[in-house]
Amino acid sequence: YRNPGIMDQVEIGAMPPVEGDIAHSFDHMRQDGIAVHAVPASGFVVDVDRPWHIMEANYAAAQHWFETLEKTVIGQGASVDDGADIAADAKLYLEPGAHIGKGCHIGGSVALGAGSQVVRGAILQGDTFVGARTECKDYCLISPGSVLGSRCIFGHGAEFDGVTFDTVYLWHYCEIAGLMGNNVDIGAATVCGTLRFDNGVRIQNVRGHKERPARFGSSTFIGDYCRTGVNVVFMPGIKVGAYSCIGAGAILYEDVPERTLLIPKQEHILKPWGPEKYGW
């Protein structure tokens, strides 16, 4: 809500708030005689205006949803192979066409979207949402509480802990912990650090506002339409802006702005070499 005459009411020299404040809006509405209605929250509440708040909200929503899931639900055409290892206390929610295959390990309750596939030794540790038509396969490992978007691929030993939006691709022994935006492609052996040597949490800077997150401050945050090359390393708490590309072998200690190509520079030493050097 924006009061058209608000600038006329601001005292000369007064500093405006650095961002919108709903409490101020409510007060302006009250002054203008506009009724303010409220609905009490029956569960959790997360104020989402920072990247890590997206993770906090998704984790809270997943936990709440699984706490209210009373029994296993198998949709039309969905199936669970007899050879799958399902924890005794796990409750499954499979939408139509979803499948859990032979040799997969399900360590707790999971919800699979329509047409999603958990196959060929995939490991889901529990309380995990998997979006529609997403594939978890080839011994990938999905940590507890993770929320995976639609049309994603997690395969070939990839490890993931966090939240993804849609069309995210993880492959070849990468270890990713954090928030991935839409259409993110992670190169082979990309790694996210999650624990600093001093056990501290990175002070985050979002549009000039600095703070130390209470949760998920050491996660990696990658924006929409980003890619990494092979063997990229993220130090704890790094943020990468949308439409950026991180070149192979880069080690990131600082945030990367949006629309940026980052390529590490190496020096090479060339010397004569031949079979005589092997001592045969």
Image: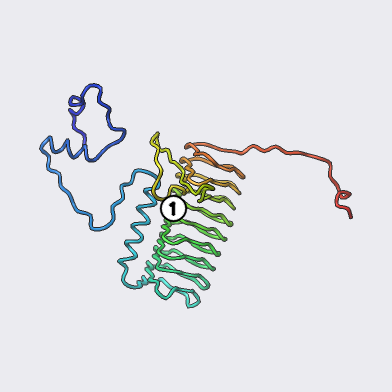
The image quadrant of residue 23 is top left
Residue on which disc 1 sits: 164
The image position of residue 183, as x and y in percent, is: 47, 48
Q: On the rendered structure, is 75 left or right of 118?
A: left
Amino acid type assigned to the residue bearing label 1 in the image: Thr
Which residue is nearer to you in this view: 74 or 40? 40
Give residue 246's position: percent from left, percent from top: 55, 42
The residue furthest top is: 12
Residue at point 85% right, 52% down? 278
Residue placed at 88% from the left, 53% from the top? 279
Tell me what residue is drawn at x 12 percent, y 39 percent: 34
Of residue 169 and residue 133, the one placed in the foreground of this image is 169
Left or right: 189 with respect to 274?
left
Q: Position of residue 207 (x, y in %)?
A: 39, 35
Q: Residues within 10 Å of mark 1 (few under 14, many from 20)?
A: many
Q: Is residue 175 above or below residue 261?
A: below
| Outermost bottom residue | 82
Residue 93 at what x, y percent from top left? 37, 68
- Residue at image point 18% right, 26% down: 9
Residue 67 left/right relative to 205: left
Compared to 54, does 12 lie above or below? above
